[in-house]
Image: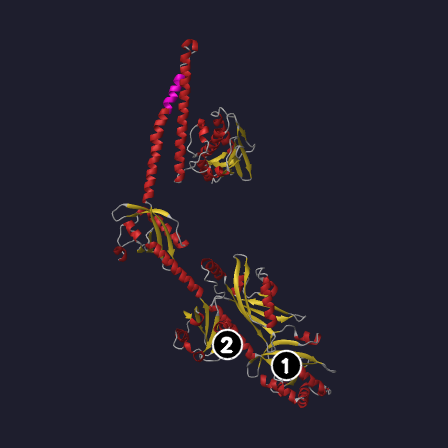
Amino acid sequence: MFALRVERACEVEQYKFLSSTNISGQQQGERFHKDLVQVEPALLDVIQDAVLIYDPHYHLSFWSRQAEELYGWTAQEALGQDVRQLLQEQIIREPMERERRLFQEKEIWEAELLHKAKDGRQVIVESHARLLPHEERSLVLETHHDVTAQRQAEQLLEEYYQRAQKAIDVGVWRWEISRDKQGRLYARGIINSRVAHFLKLPSNTLLTDEQFFTFIHPDDRPLVRRTFERVIETGSDYNAVYRMLDPEEGTVWVASRGSVVTDQQGTPLYAIGITLDITEQKQIEEALQAANRRITSILEHVADGCIHVDNEWRYSYISRGTEKLAGVHREMFLGQSIWEVTPHLCGSETERFLRLARETQQPVEYEMFYAPAQQWWKLHIVPASDHLAVYYHNITALKEIQSLYKEQEETFRRLADANLVAVASCTEESDIIDANDAFLTLIGASREELRTGKLNFAKITPKEYEALDRERHEEARSMGVSSPYEKEYYHRLGHRVPVLVAGAYMEHSKHYTAIIIDISEQKELEKQREVFFGIISHELRTPLTAIGGTLQLAQRRLKRFVCQPEECGPRVVDLLQNTGLLIEQALRQTRVQDRLIEDLLDASRIAVDKLELTMMPADLRQIVRETVEDLRATALDHTIALLLPEVPLPVCVDRMRVAQVLGNYVTNALKYSPAGAPVTVEVTSAGDEARVWVHDRGPGLSEEAKQKIWSRFQRSADAKAHSRLGANLGLGLYISQSLIRRHQGAVGVESEQGKGASFWFSLPLRTTCL
């Protein structure tokens, strides 16, 4: 606008001073300067910007009064000089080269320039220049608007954001706003190291708005884009919470705030703001909502407000967040004494900490309860040479978490005092500092011994458990908790007490807390079980083995005594045959009893996790073939068909145990199949798994029976009808399932009532045993 007004004045005079070619450039400038001042003195008085005119060689031909005041050179000193050299010009921002814009495109050239005045001062100006039409030569009219004070204020604002970044862990960004040839606004941004860390980019990376949006979660892009466009179009504040895509950590929640800086005409120049990773806050918020509906939100921003107080104790800056929180207009506070406009701070803890930070020039942190908002705040006071920066954020949610933690701690204390289990805490040196009565009773100690510090875990622990204790303590320090383990403590009376211990490490207090369960009764039961195993293995098997041996000896001797009816008589022959059948029946019953004893032992070993397997590579086809051949010798009333694949099936198994499972399956199939009905054993494979099937034509199973059949002591409802093949305890399928699971396999059954059953087990195919 200033340039156009001066241009019109110049056109009125038609630059008469240029008609004489015998006048020097300086003389022409002086004449033009004189004529222009005479023609438009009122115009020049109202123009506040410096006005100068120069030729294509940058030689000055006009130097206004405002230029004299801005730079210190008189018109007589400036006219005829190269304006660039006179002002030691440096270009700060230039959207397009000056000569191209002015002399080729003949359009207005705009730039931000750094000049040096006569007295050495640095002057920052916004420059607007355009080519003046003239018949004989080209002239450029240029206006300089002094923005030095504004840029200094912006620099202070930049410093403020840098200090804010140091005080709170945030990222700082700056978006330069420009117009394209069609006049549309667009932005390019520069990010600091913290924002670059979010985006996994180098520091100070220059991004276009479109590049920036590729890092935003697709669901959040429309909202962020609308907010971004509104900011650069209207100059309003930027405030957004959204998710960013992190190639390593997945989705990251961030909160971003910023403001737009405009020129005097209201045109947006750039936006500056901060970005904060609030992923952890989002996670805490979700946890609190699930645990307690009373907590409805957690602060979306660590810094809810920031204030600057200058060395005269006056408010020099108040953020928008502070304005909203206090419910007042910041214009009422800026420039005012904090003690006058906020008298409740006088004599308060806040005043003490503000003065402490000013005197020591050291940052101060403290917490306070803000009664008007019923909120807890954490404040960071950061001193600078000319002001105090106060940043604060709402920690009400944290206080509520601490309250919940105290409630949980009190609940735990009440549970410990209930003495359902023993609970004790100790230092890293194993000194016991707290324990409930159950623990003191466990080791035979008194409350007085605990109070006087005479109890120590190391002193009541046998030497053989020291290494295990150290291992579990290290696990608790690194993981927070230790896995349960068995050990023993010395009782005051001298005997050992077996216990199960699980511990936790408290990082803040450097203490261990252990939950201790007395397992004396369990250990006694285990001893009784071992005795029971011994009785079964020795007291029952020994006479059974002797009976079986005696019967086998009698059977062999009876077979030697063979005679014909005409030699011995029919009655003797019948007696010998009946005796042989009785001996065979007795031997069969001893084998049944031996199998029952073995099933009972296996079930007991499984219950205490002491069943051992001898794993080795094998071909599953060979195991199945050998087992079926052995079973065929005893299944005289049935046919056992065998279907095997042609290719080997490598597995890593305990051969005897797999044969035992298959034997259980086939024995059940023979037991429940009608006399003479065939039983089929089939082996299939698919992928990395082999499956063994046993198909029978028995009565089948109901859905309820299929669910219960794998449990201990489960027998078919009509088991008595099939007792011709021997009694059972209902442990066979339970043992089979446990054995196959220990081989990392699975078991199952497919059956319909009246249509037989197909029992199967699967094993993983592998060529080696790990």
Q: Position of residue 719 (x, y in %)?
A: 45, 31
Residue 74, label in figure: none
Q: Position of residue 689 (x, y in %)?
A: 53, 39
Q: Amino acid at mark 1?
A: Thr
Secondary structure mainly formed by the magenta segment: helix
> Would residue 174 be found to the left or right of residue 108 on screen?
left
Q: Which residue is mark 1?
A: 143
Q: Residue at x 59, y 62 (%)?
A: 221
Q: Is residue 482 magenta?
A: no
Q: Residue at x 54, y 77 (%)?
A: 152
> Would residue 142 be found to the left or right of residue 507 on screen?
right
Q: Is residue 71 visible?
A: no
Task: Name the secondary structure under disc 1.
Answer: strand
Above-or-below relation of 383 to 758: below
Please tell me which residue lies in front, 410 or 719. 719
Between circles 2 and 1, the one closer to the viewer is 2
Above-or-below relation of 439 to 384: above
Above-or-below relation of 746 to 113: above
Q: Which residues are magenta?
A: 548-558
Residue 330, label in figure: 2
Q: Is residue 661 visible?
A: yes
| Outermost right residue | 135
**Of callouts 2 and 1, the N-terminal one:** 1
Quarter of the picture containing the N terminus is bottom right
Q: Position of residue 26 (x, y in %)?
A: 66, 86
Please tell me which residue lies in front, 241 or 22. 241
Tell me where residue 367 sits by quadrant.
Answer: bottom left
Task: Name the secondary structure under disc 2.
Answer: helix
Between the C-alphas of marks 2 and 1, the distance is 35 Å
Q: Position of residue 460 (x, y in %)?
A: 29, 50
Q: Is residue 553 magenta?
A: yes
